[in-house]
Image: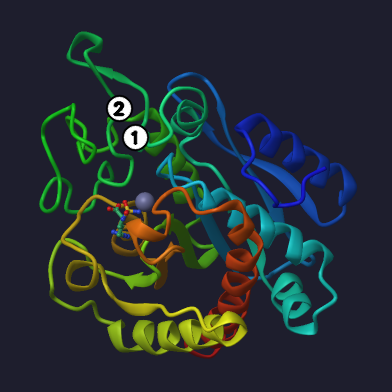
């Protein structure tokens, strides 16, 4: 049984995604953003209740150790299909959803089998003495400019060049094929309890910054309602740290998807668990995040 009371292995998540598509054949389909270095599928599910809906991308697990991210992405997928809540039905049925819970599958498996705190991909560098690039530093928008390392042993290794990792290369191609279909992209990370908007390479504000902030503030207000969980909202560069080459910024800057949000989910700090968020917080985290997405999407409709 898949019930969000623990963190699941990749294989369990992927089997569950297949079972969802079998159970809801009229409104879901299996999608793929390519293959990983170790030949695992980058598997997703598309939800579409009717033709002509605008699309929303949900990305989870680009960082392997942030286990709450795939958990929240799958919980959201389940809510969109099974919830009776009218506000959830409304966003489920009036948008197409492209949901990829684990876009770094090799890293996620490695974080289960070898090293709980693994972050990157698993391609060998330096003759196999170090592994992986940071898939959230590897994209071709201001690649290598800020908050990256050129050392392959670093956790923030950008890779030798943009899209050096097969995961980001093939996933970016898939996203290019969605360019005119989506207007909102959301990525789940952990931890810090932040809702982040572009940019990460500069403190300069993008053109629709005020809209992004207004939507973001509504979203964190809705998130806080259920359990009083406190989030901050702001641009990446000033709110968390300078960082360039992230997926959502390429989606925003190159694909020109106007609404791009990155959640740094629970907990707030290292001392409350860091990447190892206790399992009894999976469902509360997911519920409050779905609340905030209802608000975010509802509001994005009026501005986007
Ligand atoms: O460093 C990162 O990639 C993210 N923080 S994390 O602790 N989850 O690693 C921040 C990413 C900022 N988001 C974007 N640049 N879109
Ligand atoms: Zn992350």
**Mark 1 → mark 2, Cα distance in angstroms:** 5 Å
Q: Quadrant of residue 51?
A: bottom right
Residue 293 vertical position relative to residue 3 in the rendered view, above or below: below
Residue 81: x, y in percent? Answer: 80, 62
In the image, taking residue 241 as reference, residue 62 lies left or right, namely right
Residue 158 vertical position relative to residue 196 in the rendered view, above or below: above
Residue 154 vertical position relative to residue 249 in the rendered view, above or below: above
Image quadrant containing the N terminus: top right
* Residue 228 visible in the displayed image: yes
Pointer 1 residue Cβ closer than 8 Å to ligand 1: no
Q: Quadrant of residue 243?
A: bottom left
In the image, taking residue 26 as reference, residue 238 lies left or right, namely left
Q: Which residue sits furthest top?
A: 127
* Residue 255 visible in the displayed image: no
- Helix, strand or loop at label 2? It is loop
Q: Quadrant of residue 208?
A: bottom left
Q: Nearer the viewer, residue 151 or 114?
A: 114
Task: Say how the picture is coloured.
Answer: rainbow
Residue 83 vertical position relative to residue 33 in the rendered view, above or below: below
Q: Within 10 Å of the Cα at label 2, are there few (<14), some (14-19), or many (20+) other Cα atoms?
A: many
Q: Residue at x 81, y 70 (%)?
A: 83
Residue 86: x, y in percent? Answer: 80, 83
Ligand 1 quadrant?
A: bottom left
- Residues at marks 1 and 2 touching, judged by CB atoms closer than 8 Å: yes
Q: Nearer the viewer, residue 281 or 41?
A: 281
Residue 259: x, y in percent? Answer: 42, 73
- Residue that badge 1 annotates: 120
- Residue that badge 2 annotates: 132
Q: Residue at x 57, y 71 (%)?
A: 289
């Amino acid at each position: 049984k898949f019930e969000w009371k623990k963190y699941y292995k990749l294989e369990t998540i992927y089997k569950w995604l297949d079972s969802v598509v079998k159970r809801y054949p009229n409104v879901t389909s299996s999608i793929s953003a390519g293959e990983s270095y170790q030949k695992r599928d980058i598997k997703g599910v598309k939800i579409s209740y009717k033709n002509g809906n605008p699309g929303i991308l949900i990305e989870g697990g680009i960082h392997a150790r942030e286990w709450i991210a795939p958990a929240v992405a799958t919980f959201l997928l389940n809510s969109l299909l099974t919830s009776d809540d009218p506000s959830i039905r409304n966003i489920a049925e009036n948008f197409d959803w492209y949901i990829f819970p684990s876009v770094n599958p090799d890293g996620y498996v490695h974080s289960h089998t070898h090293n709980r705190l693994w972050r990157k991909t698993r391609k060998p560098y330096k003759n196999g003495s170090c592994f992986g690039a940071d898939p959230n530093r590897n994209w071709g928008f201001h690649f290598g400019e800020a908050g990256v390392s050129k050392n392959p042993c670093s956790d923030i290794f950008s890779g030798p060049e943009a899209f050096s990792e097969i995961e980001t290369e093939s996933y970016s191609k898939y996203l290019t094929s969605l360019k005119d279909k989506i207007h909102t992209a959301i990525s789940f990370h952990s931890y810090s309890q932040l809702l982040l908007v572009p940019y990460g390479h500069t403190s300069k504000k993008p053109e629709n910054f005020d809209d992004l902030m207004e939507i973001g503030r509504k979203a964190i207000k809705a998130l806080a309602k259920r359990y009083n969980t406190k989030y901050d909202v702001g641009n990446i560069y000033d709110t968390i740290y300078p960082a360039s080459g992230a997926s959502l910024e390429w989606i925003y800057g190159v694909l020109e998807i106007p609404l791009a949000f990155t959640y740094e989910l629970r907990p707030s700090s290292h001392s409350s668990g860091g990447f190892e968020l206790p399992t009894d917080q999976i469902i509360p985290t997911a519920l409050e995040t779905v609340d905030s997405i209802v608000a975010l999407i509802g509001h994005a409709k009026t501005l986007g």
